[in-house]
Image (cartoon, grey):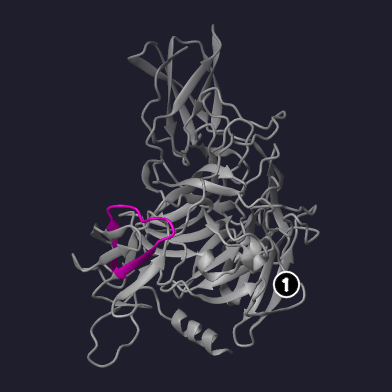
Amino acid sequence: MCLALTLLLAAATLRPGAQPAHAAGAAAPTVYPFPIPGAADALPQTQIAFRGQIPAAGSVHVRGSQSGPHSGTIRADSDGHGGSFIPDAAFAAGEVVTVSTSMNIDGGQAGSYSFTVAQPAPAPVFVRRILARHIRGSVQRFRSRPDLAPAAIKIIKNSRHTARGDLFLAPQSSPVQDGPQIRDWRGHLIWYQQLPKNDYVSDFRVQEFNGQPVLTWWQGDVVDGVGYGSDVILDGRYRPIGAVGGEGGALPDLHEFLISRRNTALVTSYVPVFWSERSVRGPARAVVLDAIVQEIDINTGLLMFEWHALDHVTLRDSHKVRLKNPTKEWDYFHVNSIQELGDGNLLISARNTWATYKINRLTGAVIWSLGGAHSNFRMGRGTRFAFQHDAELRGGNIVSMFDDGAGPPTVEKHSRVLGLRLSFRHKTATRAFSWVHVPPLRSNFEGNAEELAGAHYFVGWGHQPYFSEFSAGGREIFDGRFVCDCFHDRAYRFRWSATPLSAPNVAVVGRGRKVTVYASWNGATSIGFWRVLEGRKPTRLRVVRRARFRNFETAIQVRGARFIAVVALDGSGHPISGSSPVVRG
C-alpha cells in the first residue's frame, strides 16, 4: 500500500467531531474548514464553516483578492461542535479568499488558509415537465378527491414471502401530475400528495428525524438529468416540519436527501462553472457541472461539510463524452448517492466515472475508490459496472448498487442489481450476486437497490417503469410497474402508520331512493369501517350505515338523504376521526 493511501486510511478512522491526539500540553482542537484549504471552486455565496470548534466573535478575518475585507457574523451549529462565518456580501468570481483565524486549522498555517472562488456559468434553462403518454387506466381518479390524479400501477407478481411494508413510489413524467405516493402490498393507494404542475418528485421514503419517523422527498425542476429544487420533511400527520434548500446557491438535486444520525441533511447538488478542459484536449474555458455533496444543519440551515468533485476527481476519469459545444454544461461526474458509513465517513456514487468513492467526512479527501479509472481494488470477473446508481456498503463488506449498464453508450446487455464483496486486506472486489429482471430490462438512467430484512432487495428500475423485490437467493418474488411509461429514480418498501390531521372526504352520486356515497381519507392507515350519517338538516344527522373499508375510496350504497357525512372507524369499530364535511345528497 502506498504511503499516501496509508495516511488517508488512518485519517478515515477518526469519527466526525473526534479530535486527533496532540502533543502533551496542546489544548487547541483541530478545526476542519469548508471550503477546504486550496479549494478551487468555492461558490461566491458560500459561508465559511468550521467543524471542531465554534469560532469566537471577531476571531475570523476574511479578505478577497478583488473584493477586499469582508464583514460577517458568526453562527453556531446546533450540535455545539462548530459554526460558520456568514459573509455580509458575496465573493467575486475567480478571486482568492484568505481566511485568518486564531484556531488550529487543518491544512492551514498559523490559523490561516485560502481558497479560490469559482466562476459560475449561466443557470440552466428550465423546460416543461415531460409527460408520459396517457393510456387507458394510467391515471386514477376519485369522486371524493377530484383534485388527485396519481399515476396508476399494476402488480404483476406477488408472494407471501415478500418483506413487510408498503410501497413508496415517486413517478416522474406522470400523464397528469407528479407526486409522492404510498401504496399497500396489493398496490392500493394509501396516500398521495399532488405537486405543482411542473415539479418533478424523487427519493420519496421514510426516515428518522429527532427520533420520530418522517416522510421525505425532493421536488423541483429537472434539466438533463440534474435536479434543482428543495427537500421536504413531513411528520406522521402529514404536516410540513422542515425543508432543506441547499447552501451558498447550490440547490438540492433529485438524487439524494439523507437525514444523518445527527439530524443533519446530506444532499447532492450541481453548479455549472467555467473550467479548463485542457486536460481532455478541450478549450481553456468551457462549462462543466461541478457535482457537490453538502451536509446541512437542518435546524439552522448552516453548512457543516462540503465536497466538490472538481477538487478531487480529474476530468480524465469521466466516461461521459466531452461536449463539442463548450457553452453547454458537461456533466463529467454526476454524483447520485450518499451513504453515511459506520465510521462516520461517506460513500458516494458517481454515474459518469463508473466509480464509487469513500470520502473522509473531516477533510473531504478520497480514502479509496471502487471501479473507474483508479480503483484501489482489483476488479474480479463480472464486477465491472457502468453508469451505476445507489451504491451502499452493506454487512460482510458487500457494496450493493443498481448497475444501469447503459448511458448511452450501452455497456451491458441488461441492467442488474449487483453486489461486490470487498477484501480490504487483499484489495480485491469479487462478485457476490448479480440479479436481473424477468424479462430483462435496460435502464439508461436512475434506479436503486434497497436492502430489506432477510437480505431481500427492493429495486426501482430507473427509467424503466418497474419496481421489484428479490429474495436473498436472487429470486424475483414481487414485480410491479406503472401503467404508463413513467420513469422514477427510486422505489422503496417501508412500514408506515399515520393518522392525517385533515378530515375525511365524502362525495355523493345519484338521487332518489338510492345514492352512492364515496368515502376517503388520504393517508389514513388504520381504517376498518366507515360510518355513514344522514339527515334532513346538516346539524341533525343520524347513523344509517356501517360499511367495511375497501380501498382508498370506498363506495357505499344508502337510501337517498338530503345531507350526508362519514366517520372513519378502526378495526374494532371505534371512531378514529371526526366527521367529514357535510354534503348534500
Residue 201 appears at what percent x and percent y? Answer: 54, 43
Q: Quadrant of the N terminus?
A: bottom right
Which residue is pictured at 60% across the width and 42% down the height?
171
Q: Is residue 391 magenta?
A: no
Q: Which residue is mark 1?
A: 383
Quadrant housing residue 583 = top left
> Is residue 136 in view from this perspective?
yes
Residue at image coords 31%, 74%: 112
Viewer-side residue, 513 vs 333: 333
In the image, what residue type sits under mark 1?
Answer: Thr
385 lies above or below 527: below
Q: Is residue 110 above or below residue 128?
A: below
Total count of labels? 1
In this rendering, position of residue 389 left or right of residue 214: right
Give the residue at x 43% y 64%.
306
User: Extreme left residue here?
Assistant: 57
- Left or right for 466, reference 438: left
Q: Nearer the viewer, residue 202 or 502?
A: 202
Find residue 46 and report its image quarter. Answer: bottom left
Q: Residues within 10 Å of mark 1 (few under 14, many from 20)?
A: some
Residue 92 location in percent, x, y? 38, 55
Position of 403 relative to 127 (above/below):
below
Q: Where is residue 226 drawn, in percent x and y?
A: 57, 49
| x, y percent for residue 276 | 58, 62
Residue at 76% from the left image edge and 53% from the top image edge: 442
Residue at the limit of the structure toward the bottom, as seen here? 24
Q: Quadrant of residue 400?
A: bottom right
Q: Secondary structure at mark 1?
A: loop
The span picked out in magenta is 82-99
The answer to whether residue 98 is magenta is yes
Q: Is residue 354 visible?
A: no
